[in-house]
Amino acid sequence: MRNKRLVIGWIALSFWIGLIFYMSNQPGDVSSKQSGLVLKLFQVIGIDLNKELGELATFIVRKAAHFTEYFILYLLTVNVMKYYFGIKRAILYALIFSIFYACTDEIHQYFIPGREMAFKDVLIDSSGASLAMIITIISIKMNVNKKNENNINITE
């Protein structure tokens, strides 16, 4: 069962890394159209971000995508690394890997027409991974506390 979960974890992580690479490989005009599609989806459900935020709406959608991509990357990475390292090291290594990949992703974008390398995007990506790490740590601590409460033996 462990091997099956590990294989599935690797497949999911590899797919996600490939998806981030693919999205970063899109020229600037294609990437802008994708952001426009997200804004239209919000309109369909009754939220007109363009009306409320104007040009800022596209910026927010693009940066939220960065944050979310790396939030998910962190979770998928820690899920794989926990099979190779203790959970504490897996948590740390997953964060390091996510930040490293964010840096290489920005370097990659430097070579794509209409895209640019931006340190602020690395910070946004790293923030997404960091929030995922914090949530992971809290979740683990809550599960440990829950197990400890269930193991308390009241004999009096």
Image: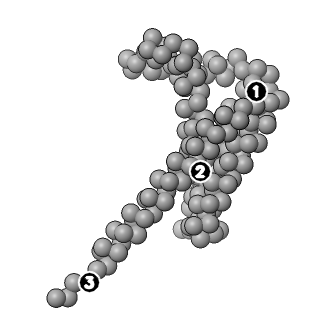
- Viewer-closest of 79 and 127: 127
Q: CA distance from mark 1 to mark 3?
A: 60 Å
Q: Earlier in the sequence, mark 1 or mark 3?
A: 1
Q: Amino acid at mark 2?
A: Tyr
Q: Is residue 97 left or right of residue 63?
A: right
Given this view, does label 1 or label 3 mark the residue nearer the observer?
1
Q: Is residue 151 visible?
A: yes
Percent x, y of residue 83:
61, 67
Q: Is residue 131 left or right of residue 102?
A: left
Query: Which residue sits at x=83%, y=29%?
Result: 111
Quadrant of the image for the N terminus? Answer: bottom right
Quadrant of the image for the C terminus? Answer: bottom left
Which color scheme is applied?
Answer: one colour
| Residue 74 marker | 2
| Other-residue count near label 1 (Cα within 10 Å), few / some / many at <14 / 14–19 / ≥20 | some
Residue at numbered disc 1 = 116
Q: Amino acid at mark 3?
A: Asn
Percent x, y of residue 33:
63, 17
Disc 1 secondary structure class: loop
Disc 2 secondary structure class: helix
From this view, report whether residue 12 is shown above or below residue 38.
below
| Residue 153 marker | 3
- Image marks 2 and 3: residues in contact by CB distance under 8 Å: no
